[in-house]
Image (cartoon, grey):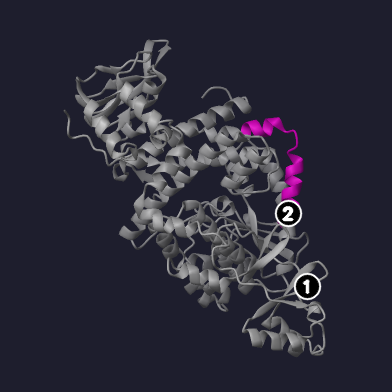
């Protein structure tokens, strides 16, 4: 009986001890010569094959002009398994051929079916569903469990403060004494059916700066536009919300009922034992030097979160919010106050989508009101770009920055450029448009950005030719399902071209067609599913695939950053396949199948023909 079979790898580690014993008792072993067919398409499979030594290709036979050929999908090597789907279905769907002398363990089909029927997780894993596999891998990864529980902490799990509420006729003097007695720095005032918030700073400004009588009701100085969050929402989202909104408190509401208040200091205290939270330093920065010190900690924050196993999407949300605040603060410090209402700073590309992790190239632009006279604009924007470079945001190789006059436009000029790009088939114009439609405002007057975006949406109505041409770009790069073997010697793969870009651009096209305002790809997918444009299962698979691509890329970016402390990573999108864990390679393979299916969907939807 074979004894070298490893049970500590997924999916076999999902089996109970008795199930593992059953598997061992029924294991067989087989030897295949180079070129020998291990399993032929259409045949009844013996069972699941697990490679002990050697290499096997999975291919599909096709008839072409020169005769029958084989399109290789993927290669399997040591400890890889294959044929599970075929065993469950009772018929092999592809050819499996030994490309060198190969020894395989064989788990008989009957044994596989028995284990699938008694172990739900084992069955789910073998369904080749990327979302299910990813969830199982995360659940059974011990090193990330503690951080995962932390990241999934809810607002209602311990940081809500009981709301202190006063009547609307309470005076400033009475409220000040009330705060001192209760040792708090804020309270709520109820005015009719609405709640307003009053802070210690509000009281001080009212009494000292505005010289209001101490008998003035606090209801007159309260802020009634409160940002709320649900008690079942993630605590992490509360931090992101406060960072984005530049506030230190949110109210907790459940079905119009006031539950309490969440204070930024409480959230940061909860987070501080786990990672390096720097949001407070960014908010408190009063000089460019202070802001530089705060921004310098962002990469370390990401490394910390990733090392603890935080889901990449959480890390992206937090970094996007903090990057936005860094840029907004720098904008406020450098742009004259009287000019700020007349200009809007937008970020584009991955930063606009909120999908940037490590600091990458600057992709930003300025939209200003028509007829604006600002003689120092060029000089000031050059300084802005230079400071961002000092902060660790590299210059854009394509010079898509506010220091480049091409990306500084009046509202009229901006809408004209959008129109010109959308009617051009030139590669550079299409690239500029793709970058621009991912834009979001981060500082200045956002109404300028929204006016341009709304005009552009209307201009594309019923323009099928545009969408067909725009979608075609998502098919430009080959899906690397065969590259694990063919690039083995080089050991590298461009994950952006092969995986990230087709999903991002395909979803971008759909979102643009249906006027979805979200720019983040994950949120665009959710909106497409909610609108019934995309099936729920399809949306989950795309999100999991994109998340995996970004996560694997990030890990290797961090690894290279640690190995080379100086300089910019010249290959931020390159994956070293040799360094990937077997399970990562398997998930990566499944994710590429998702990409391949999505590209076929785009071909059909936009009548692009077979590629």
Calculate the distance from the C-alpha at mark 2 to the C-alpha at mark 1: 34 Å
Q: Is residue 553 shown to the viewer in this render? A: yes
Q: What residue is disc 2 on? A: 450
Q: What residue is disc 1 on? A: 190
Q: Is residue 453 magenta?
A: yes
Q: Is residue 358 shown to the viewer in this render? A: no
Q: Is residue 26 magenta?
A: no
Residue at 72% x, 49% y: name it: 453
Percent position (x, y) of residue 511? 65, 41
Q: Is residue 447 left or right of residue 109?
A: right
Q: Write the start and end of the magenta stretch as one range.
A: 449-469
As helix, strand or loop, the secondary structure at mark 1 comes to: strand
Total numbered badges shown on the rendered structure = 2
Percent position (x, y) of residue 74? 36, 29
> Callout 1: 10 Å neighbours few (<14), some, many (20+)?
some
Q: Which quadrant of the figure has residue 3?
A: top left
Mark earlier in primary sequence (2, 1): 1
Mark in front: 2 vs 1: 1
Residue 77 to residue 610: above or below: below
Residue 116 to residue 140: above or below: above
């Amino acid at each position: 009986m074979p004894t070298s079979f490893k049970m500590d790898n997924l999916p076999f580690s999902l089996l109970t001890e008795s199930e593992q014993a059953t598997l061992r008792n029924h294991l067989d072993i087989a030897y295949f010569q180079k070129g020998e067919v291990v399993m032929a398409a259409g045949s009844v499979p013996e069972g699941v094959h697990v490679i002990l030594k050697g290499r096997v290709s999975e291919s599909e036979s096709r008839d072409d002009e020169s005769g029958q050929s084989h399109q290789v999908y993927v290669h399997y090597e040591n400890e890889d398994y294959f044929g599970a789907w075929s065993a469950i279905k009772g018929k092999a769907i592809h050819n499996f051929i030994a490309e060198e002398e190969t020894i395989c363990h064989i788990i008989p089909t009957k044994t596989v079916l028995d284990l699938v029927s008694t172990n739900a997780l084992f069955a789910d894993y073998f369904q080749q569903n990327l979302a299910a596999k990813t969830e199982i891998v995360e659940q059974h990864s011990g090193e990330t469990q503690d951080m995962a529980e932390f990241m999934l902490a809810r607002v209602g799990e311990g940081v809500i403060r009981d709301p202190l509420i006063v009547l609307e006729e309470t005076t400033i003097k009475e409220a000040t004494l009330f705060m001192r007695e209760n040792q708090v720095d804020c309270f709520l005032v109820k005015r009719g059916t609405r709640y307003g918030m009053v802070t210690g700073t509000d009281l001080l400004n009212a009494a000292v700066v505005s010289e209001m009588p101490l008998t003035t009701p606090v209801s007159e100085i309260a802020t009634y536009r409160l940002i709320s969050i649900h008690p079942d929402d993630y605590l992490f989202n509360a931090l992101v919300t406060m960072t984005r909104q530049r506030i230190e408190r949110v109210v907790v509401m459940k079905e119009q009922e006031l539950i309490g208040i969440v204070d930024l200091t409480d959230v940061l205290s909860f987070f501080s034992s786990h990672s390096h939270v720097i949001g407070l330093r960014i908010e408190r920065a009063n000089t460019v030097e202070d802001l530089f010190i705060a921004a310098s900690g962002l990469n370390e924050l990401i490394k910390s979160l990733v090392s603890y196993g935080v889901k990449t999407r959480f890390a992206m949300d937090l970094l996007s919010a903090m990057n936005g605040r860094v840029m907004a603060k720098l904008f406020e410090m450098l742009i004259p106050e009287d000019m700020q209402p007349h200009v809007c700073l937008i970020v584009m590309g991955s930063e606009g989508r909120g999908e940037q992790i490590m600091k990458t190239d600057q992709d930003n632009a300025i939209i200003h009101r028509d007829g604006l006279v600002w003689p120092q604009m060029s000089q000031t924007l050059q300084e802005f770009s230079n400071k961002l470079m000092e902060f660790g945001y590299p210059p854009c190789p394509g010079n898509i920055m506010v220091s480049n006059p091409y990306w500084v436009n009046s509202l009229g000029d901006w809408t004209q450029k959008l129109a010109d790009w959308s009617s051009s088939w030139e590669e550079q114009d299409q690239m500029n448009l793709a970058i621009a439609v991912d834009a979001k405002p981060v500082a200045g007057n956002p109404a300028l950005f929204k006016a341009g975006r709304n005009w552009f949406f209307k201009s594309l109505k019923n323009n099928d030719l545009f969408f067909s041409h725009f979608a075609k770009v998502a098919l430009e790069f080959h899906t690397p399902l065969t590259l694990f073997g063919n690039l083995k010697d080089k050991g590298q793969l461009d994950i952006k071209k092969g995986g990230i870009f087709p999903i991002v651009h395909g979803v971008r096209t759909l979102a643009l067609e249906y006027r979805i305002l979200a720019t983040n790809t994950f949120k665009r997918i959710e909106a497409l599913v909610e609108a019934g444009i995309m099936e729920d299962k399809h949306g989950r698979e795309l999100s999991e695939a994109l998340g995996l691509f970004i996560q694997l890329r990030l890990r290797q970016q961090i690894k290279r950053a640690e190995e080379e402390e100086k300089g910019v990573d010249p290959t931020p999108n390159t994956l070293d396949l040799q360094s990937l864990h077997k399970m990562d390679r398997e998930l990566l393979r499944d994710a590429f199948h998702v990409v391949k299916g999505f590209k076929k969907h785009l071909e059909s939807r936009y009548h692009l023909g077979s590629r």
